[in-house]
Image: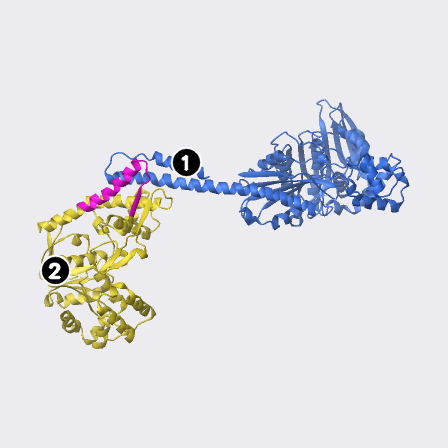
Amino acid sequence: MGVREKVATATFEEISASDFFYRNRDIAGLTNPSRAIFVAIREIVENSLDAAESQKIPPDIYVRLSFESEATKETQVYKLRVEDNGSGIQPRFIPSAFGQVLYGSKYKLKQMRGTFGLGGKMAVLYGQITTHQPAYVTSSTGQAKIYSFKLMIDIQRNRPIILDRKVLINKDNWRGTIVEFTLEGDYLRAMPKILDYFKQTAMVNPYANLTFVDPKGRLYKFTRATTTMPEPPKETLPHPYGVDVELLQRLITITPYNNMQEFLKGHFHRVGEITAQKFLEFSALSPSKNPKKLSHEEIVRLMQNLKKYKDFLPPDASCLSPLGEELLKAGVMKELKPEYLVVHQRKPSTYAGHPFIVEMAMAYGGDVPKRGCFVIYRFANKIPLLYDEASDVSYRVISAMNWRRYKVAPDMPIAIVVHICSTKVPYKTVGKEFIADRPEVRREVANALREVARQLQHFLTKQEHVHMEKKRLGIFSKYLPKIAQFATTLAGQEKLPDIDKLLKSVQKYGAEES
Amino acid sequence: MEQKKAKIVERKNEVISGLKAFGTQIYNQLDEGIFPTINMPSRSTENINYDPTLRQFILGEKSVSRSARNIRHIKPFTQLAWAAMFSNELTSQRKTSTLRDVYYSAQAYEMTFTDQQESNNIITDLETLTGFAREDFNIFPEERSAIFGDLDIGYTVPGYEGKTLNLTSHPDGVLIGPALTSAEFIKTGADKVIAIEKGALFTRFIEENVHNKHKSLLISCGGQAPRQTRSFIRRLHDELGLPVFILTDGDPWGMHIAQVIISGSANAAHLRELNTPDAVWSGVWASDIIEYKLPTDPLDEVDIKRLYELQKDPRYQNDPLWQREIKLFLKIRRKAEQEAFSRYGLTYIVDEYLPTKLEAK
């Protein structure tokens, strides 16, 4: 059994009700019928990608959206089916994983696409409330059996209702998960975003095969360019700087430790014997105090001191899984086929106790669309961000840059790819569409941008030289033979003079120049 | 006569060998693996000086170099090589061409010129480089002027060798083109040349029998006289010893038409024998306007500006006549055309004005 199960056993827990999200589904991005269908696809696909990646399996994901019936004037009922070759889910977790909101495997700190274990279930919940149909989940971890569930969500009690359960023999050792449910939406309006989503997902997941069949039966296929995968992220404890009262209280509820010294060591990232001791001195707390006995005021003070104390070690980045320069290059190359591509990965940095890494690519020419402004592709934890571009920190940094310094003009065919990965991406809103303008993040984005811009500038300068040189050589090889021909006729000579030496000499001269 | 013929053939051989020498120079440089380079006098304004002895503009000491190695020079260099080759063909095969024709012929050699001006410049380069006029290469401009009067010429152009013509044969006059400019002078009954700015007065003079009454060869310049006409006037003066009188409108432009025949133009500073320093501007002067009470128009701004320019021009310094007339024009601020004499009747200009003017010299 994989890592996943162990992780799951330790961290699955119920923390809220479906009801809340039923009433507030806007915050998950399900604001309107076109947005809903886009978000549903995105959430399920991202779960699938995570499930494959956590096992270092190159993902193979098949998505089919088929038309079921007309619903209202603008909306239709669609059936969404997503198949993956990921880790698969243990049968006992399947009903809760898809039938209970905020039940997830993503509740510890490591970089994952989703944040709350919310998206997939919200999509299923949205399907249920718009079509009153059950969801079908089939999964196998590659063992002897395949489990198939027909589920609905009891919204008020936030519990899965199992309508049917089948067990099949897994003759072919199949591994993966298939999710199928119906939902109401507006595909025609959502289509451009959905296609963008797949293209951009393919860009930052160059090791994935993505197939999408749309309601008209059109096939969109994105084939992997490599089978190399990034290192999966390691799970870490929260860093003291990133802690809030809510988290402290939750940790106190579940902690097995009965003194502060052990509590700090056991629940926080990079806090050891000495650091714990010194911190407790700093905040005038007895190391032997039982954390469960802390008063509300003491908890608040503890939280404030955790933020105030200067000597915590910075978080390490092992909990992050950046794409890496090679994979980013492969992905952008595959989707944009640029004439020139430069990628750059920044060293890990932190904001408010959360580690993050900025990765950037700059692509020039080739299939990069020429729009009269830069084409910006934004990603957070390998998720394409498709809305609210102008509010994003990257957009602001790019706009504020003095491009003339880099000999770059906005009308050049240039695409900028920004990938920010973090255990907690600083989204500005719950809709997860753009990244807040945090000074630490801004600085990293700006530094990465300068680096790639510098390299593009070198390329452009060199290209200009090569171009000039070509032109120069072209002129010589056009005119020298003519001069030879005219001179021969004029001088009354029979044989043309040998001009090869001259032509070679201009070539050599040119090579030195560039 | 034989001597003259020999001189024409000799000149032609000089032209051909000059062009060939240029070709051989390039050929040898190429063959030795050297980028061909040529030097020629600079035609920039600061290198154009007036030579009071020669009484024309000449080029100074400055020279320019054109190298096929230079990326900016190689195209004009190639064009120049082509122009030399083309000129050599024309001259050797005794064919004539025009500036326009040169521009189009280049296209057959994939040797394009951006425009007519560019190809004209290259021909001027070739003139500067070799010291021969384009007419020597049998390249002529489009514009033509005409001559009328008692002069027998003998053709030298292919197919007409030995044929002669008297230039009174046709009442419209005879075109001054390649066939005429290459012809030999046999004999003349005239004792002077009268060059006239406009075709209308030229026709009037023929009708009024001026060529007989005043024993003259009449030339219509057609405005600014083309180079071949200026060179032809020079030949009439040098070879036949005829004095030359020039009649133009009474304004700065007419005055300058006369001046160019006398002293040449800055554009042709690289060439010799296109001007006739002894030719005389006979009118219409500013003082004639007063004396003959001619109907006039006021000078406009451009006319006045031009007068001030001419006042400073070195060509207007050698004869007090010029400065006197310029000052007078500026004083009366009026101008008159040759046709202004018609107020005294159609023949007045021939019967009264012309004899007085011819006498004056």
- Label 1 or label 2, whichever lies nearer to me, is 1
In the image, residue A487 sits, relative to residue B5, either above or below, namely: above
Neighbours of disc 2 within 10 Å: few (<14), some (14-19), many (20+): few
Disc assigned to residue A508: 1
Q: As shown in the figure, which amino acid type bears the numbered disc 1? A: Lys
Q: Residue furthest right?
A: A293
Query: Which subunit holds the residue at mark 2?
Result: B
Compared across the picture, whether B64 is left or right of A392 comes to left
Q: Nearer the viewer, residue B75 or B33?
A: B33
Under tag 1, what secondary structure? helix
Neighbours of disc 1 within 10 Å: few (<14), some (14-19), many (20+): few
Q: Is residue B252 magenta?
A: no
Q: Residue A257's spot in the image, x, y percent?
A: 87, 34
Q: Quadrant of residue B236?
A: bottom left
Query: Which subunit holds the residue at mark 1?
Result: A
- The colour chain B appears in is yellow
Q: Residue B116's spot in the image, x, y percent?
A: 32, 52
Q: Nearer the viewer, residue A36 or B339?
A: B339
Same chain for mark 1 and mark 2? The answer is: no
* Whether residue A433 is visible: no
Residue beneath label 2, please? B241
Distance of label 1 from label 2 (alpha carbons)? 63 Å
Q: Quadrant of the C terminus of chain B?
A: bottom left
Under tag 2, what secondary structure? loop
Span highlighted in magenta in the image: B13-39
| Majority secondary structure in the magenta region | helix
In the image, residue B224 sits, relative to residue A227, either above or below, namely: below
Among the chains pictured, the one given blue colouring is A
Q: Quadrant of residue B302?
A: bottom left
Q: As shown in the figure, which amino acid type bears the numbered disc 2? A: Gly
Q: Residue B353's spot in the image, x, y percent?
A: 16, 73
